[in-house]
Each structure stands twice: as C-alpha cells, then as structure tokens.
Image (cartoon, rainbow, N blue to C red):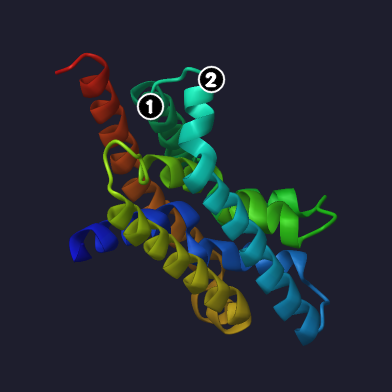
Amino acid sequence: MSELFLSHLIYFIAVIDPVGTVPVFLAVTKGFGRADLVKTAFKAIILSSVVLLFFVVAGEFILSGMNVPLPAFQIAGGIVLLLFALSMIFGESKPEEELRLAKSANDTAIYPLAIPSIAGPGAMLAAVLLTENSKYSIAQQSVTVAAMVCVLLLTLVALLLAGPIHRIIGQSGASIISRVMGILLTSVAVSNMIEGIKLSFNI
C-alpha cells in the first residue's frame, strides 16, 4: 500500500503541479488583502477537490454509460496527457499558459485557479484511471484518494505561502519545475497508452 501511495502521490504532484500554480495565484490575486487571498486559496482547493472527487466516483460510470471501454479511454487519455506534457516541455509552461488565461478571468478562484490550474485535464484523467474498479480494490482506491487529497493540501500550503515561494524560485524557477513535471507526465502518458493497447488487443 505504501508503494501505491507513493507512486500515485508522485503522479498527482506531476499532473497538479502545486508550485506551477503559485505564479498564477499571485497574478490573479494581485491587489487582494490577506483575508481575500486566504479565501480565494481555500475556495479554489475546495472547488477543485469536488471536481476531482466527482471524477473518482462517477468517471467510470459515465464512460460505461457512453459504452466507452476503459482501455480506449486509457489510450485517448494517454494521447491527451502526452500532448499536455509536451506543451509543458516545449511550449508554454503551465504557469506561463495559465497566466495568459488569468487576464480575462472573472472569478479567479474558479478560473483559472480551480480549473484548469489545479483540477486540469491530467488530474481528471488520473482520478479516473487510478481508481479503476476492475483494477483497484476499494482499499487501494482509498489510498489513491488519500494521495490526491495530500497533493491538494500541499497545493493549498503553496498558495498560502505563494509570496515567499515566488520570491525564492521566481518565475523562471516555476517554469523549470513545470517542465520537469512535463517530462514525468510524458512517461506516464506513454505508459497509459501501452497498457491501453495491451488490454484492447489482449497482448
């Protein structure tokens, strides 16, 4: 169980990227008082938690209702995750892309903080794939949810300490970390596609 927790913890750290959310948070909360900063941080984490928990509980049922086999979702999700990861490595890094989105945001706690900065496509995909009913027991799924909650709490801490963190690592530091996370996500995406292909063709 400890190995499962650690591997899924690293997975969620890569897809959520708590440090990469810091520059976005600072940009969309510029001029806010301390009370509003704290309120926005908590609201963003709560909203993203609800979204991800929804995918944990209902994601697989929605796929079943649409007659989409999970291996097909793994392959498609792996492709999406790969493109997302490659954009983090070669294109705009997560903080750079979401800083651009933040310029037109109305409710900053929802967009772009909760979605897509915290509960992004990669995190939603992970919530479904890492809690697959046919592959993981209820106990194992509980461990996965615990790992996800830990990363969300880590993200909350990062948001509450956004000022000091940003002063230490700077915008370039956040961009570098985001690109490293992109490399990790690339390997995860390829692994998902290979596993989906194996299941589809009974290899």
Q: Which residue shows up at 60% across the image and 74% down it?
A: 159
Give the residue pinned by disc 2: 66
Mark 2, Cα crowd under 10 Å, few <14 / some 14-19 / many 20+, is: few
Q: Amino acid at mark 2?
A: Met
Disc 1 secondary structure class: helix
Q: Which residue shows up at 64% across the image and 65% down it?
A: 46
Along the line of sight, the residue nearer the viewer: 187 or 147: 147
Q: Which residue shows up at 29% across the image and 25% down it?
A: 196
Q: Is residue 89 visible?
A: no
How far across and how far down the image is residue 81, in percent? 44, 36
Quick one: quadrant of the C terminus?
A: top left
Q: Is residue 20 visible?
A: yes
Look at the picture and state if 83 lies above or below 31. Answer: above
Look at the picture and state if 6 lies above or below 167. Answer: above
Q: CA distance from mark 2 to mark 1?
A: 11 Å
Mark 1, Cα crowd under 10 Å, few <14 / some 14-19 / many 20+, is: many
Give the residue pinned by disc 1: 70
Disc 2 secondary structure class: loop
Residue at the top extreme, as displayed: 201
How far across and how far down the image is residue 104, in percent? 82, 50
Look at the picture and state if 190 lies above or below 22. Answer: above
Instruction: Indicate which disc residue 141 carries.
Output: none
Along the line of sight, the residue nearer the viewer: 55 or 102: 55
Q: Which residue shows up at 43% across the image and 31% down it?
A: 77
Apparent side of residue 126 relative to residue 201 in the rendered image (left or right): right
Q: Amino acid at mark 1?
A: Leu
How far across and how far down the image is residue 57, in percent? 50, 46
